[in-house]
Image: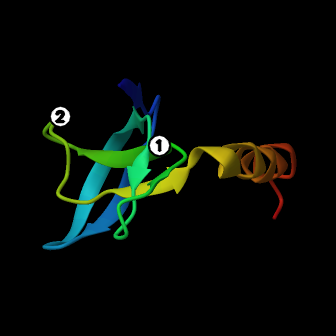
């Protein structure tokens, strides 16, 4: 598990109880993702926002490990092109 705390700003997340203040995220890797048919697919990374109270929010999503490089590439594009 990895926690990333935002350095300067507070953002927001939309969870099951509405909007909350987000002060960082937690990343958690699973080694496989069991499918409904019982097969084991590749691993995933779960993203969980952290609230302004320093607690994990009741909100999360997962990304397949094999798609992480594409996400990193696109995030880098936003960092490199701030005017967008």
- 3D distance between C-alphas at marks 1 and 2: 21 Å
Relative to 6, does residue 22 appear above or below in the rendering? below
Q: Secondary structure at mark 2?
A: loop
Where in the figure is residue 2, as x and y percent of width and height? 40, 24
Q: Crowdedness of circle 2 by 10 Å Cα count: few (<14), some, many (20+)? A: few
Where in the figure is residue 65, as x and y percent of width and height? 59, 44
Q: Is residue 78 left or right of residue 8?
A: right
Q: Nearer the viewer, residue 58 or 1?
A: 1
Relative to 39, does residue 18 appear above or below in the rendering? below
Relative to 1, does residue 27 appear above or below in the rendering? below
Q: Nearer the viewer, residue 44 or 57?
A: 44
Q: Quadrant of residue 19?
A: bottom left
Taking the spot 41% from the left edge, 51% from the top edge, the residue there is 33
Q: Is residue 4 left or right of residue 60?
A: right
CB-based contact (under 8 Å), mark 1 and mark 2? no
Where in the figure is residue 24, as x and y percent of width and height? 37, 38
Q: Crowdedness of circle 1 by 10 Å Cα count: few (<14), some, many (20+)? A: many
Could you tell me how many numbered marks the image carries? 2
Q: Nearer the viewer, residue 40 or 6?
A: 40
Taking the spot 77% from the left edge, 51% from the top edge, the residue there is 70
Q: Which residue is mark 2?
A: 54
Q: Earlier in the sequence, mark 1 or mark 2?
A: 1
Which quadrant does the N terminus fall into? top left
Where in the figure is residue 12, as x and y percent of width and height? 35, 60
Q: Which residue is mark 1?
A: 45
Front position among marks 1 and 2: 1
Relative to 41, does residue 32 appear above or below in the rendering? above
Which quadrant does the C terminus fall into? bottom right
User: Residue 75: which numbered mark, if any?
Assistant: none
């Amino acid at each position: 598990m990895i926690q990333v705390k935002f350095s300067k700003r507070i953002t927001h997340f939309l969870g099951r109880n509405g909007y909350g203040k987000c002060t960082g995220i937690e990343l958690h890797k699973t080694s496989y993702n069991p499918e409904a048919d019982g097969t084991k697919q590749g691993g995933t990374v779960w993203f969980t926002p952290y609230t302004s109270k320093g607690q994990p929010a009741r909100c999360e999503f997962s990304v397949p490990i094999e798609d992480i490089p594409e996400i990193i590439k696109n995030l880098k594009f936003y960092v490199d092109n701030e005017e967008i």
